[in-house]
Image: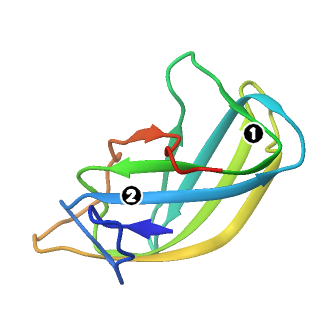
């Protein structure tokens, strides 16, 4: 889910404005050293951000959970992006799961933007995650 700063689901992202991406999951087993990754795939580019906290590894417990990515500011160019989500263990060659095209994000911009570039991000496990 995409969320604005007030927790509402926007119709589109805006270049230069904050955007939260909430990834909800259900784990069958306890997993250590887990990394969640979102891939933003535009019409003319393949843009990717990997979420992890340095050498700290996220532990996932059985049941429902969530992780949020904060893109502040959103640095994507205007386009319509297909979002893939993956989960893997650090150091693994193949993902444990890969959701292809799980969401679409249209991005508009109040600026004349050309090209694409790496998006800064932070991550957290939200306090209301089950």
- Horizontal arrangement in the rendering, residue 11 relative to residue 109 (left or right): right
Q: x and y percent of residue 78 in the render?
A: 28, 74
- In the depicted structure, whether residue 91 falls above or below residue 11: above
Residue 96 percent coordinates (x, y): 83, 45
Q: Position of residue 69 (x, y in %)?
A: 45, 49
> Is 73 positioned to the left or the right of 41 in the image?
left
In the picture shown, does residue 38 fall above or below 99?
Answer: above
Residue appearing at x 45%, y 63% in the figure: 45
Residue mark closest to the camera, 1 vs 2: 2
Q: Position of residue 51 (x, y in %)?
A: 52, 39
Left or right for 33, reference 54: right
Question: Callout 1 environment at 10 Å: few (<14), some (14 to 19), or many (20+)?
Answer: some
Is the image coloured rainbow, by chain, by secondary structure, or in one colour? rainbow
The answer for how far apart the CA atoms under marks 1 and 2 are is 21 Å
Instruction: Look at mark 1 in the image and give the residue it sits on.
Output: 88
Nearest the camera: 62 or 21?
A: 62
Task: Using the rendered view, name the quadrant where residue 12 is placed.
Answer: bottom left
- In the image, residue 41 sits, relative to residue 89, either above or below, namely below
What residue is drawn where x is 84% and y is 34%? 30
Q: Tell me what residue is drawn at x 56 percent, y 53 percent.
A: 38
Query: At numbered mark 1, what does the secondary structure look like: helix, strand or loop?
Result: strand
* Closer to the camera in the image, 113 or 6: 6
Q: Which mark is residue 20?
A: 2
Q: Residue at x 34, y 78 (%)?
A: 10
């Amino acid at each position: 889910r995409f969320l604005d700063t007030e927790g509402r689901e926007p119709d589109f992202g805006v270049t230069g404005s904050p955007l939260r991406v909430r990834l909800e999951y259900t784990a069958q087993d306890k997993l250590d050293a887990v990394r969640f990754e979102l891939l933003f795939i535009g019409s003319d580019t393949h843009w990717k951000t990997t979420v992890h906290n340095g050498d700290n590894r996220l532990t996932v417990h059985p049941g429902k959970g969530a992780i949020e990515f904060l893109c502040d500011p959103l640095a994507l160019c205007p386009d319509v992006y297909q979002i893939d989500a993956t989960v893997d263990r650090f150091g693994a060659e193949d993902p444990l799961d890969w959701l292809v095209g799980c969401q679409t994000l249209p991005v508009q911009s109040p600026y004349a933007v050309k090209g694409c570039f790496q998006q800064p991000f932070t991550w957290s496990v939200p306090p209301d995650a089950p």
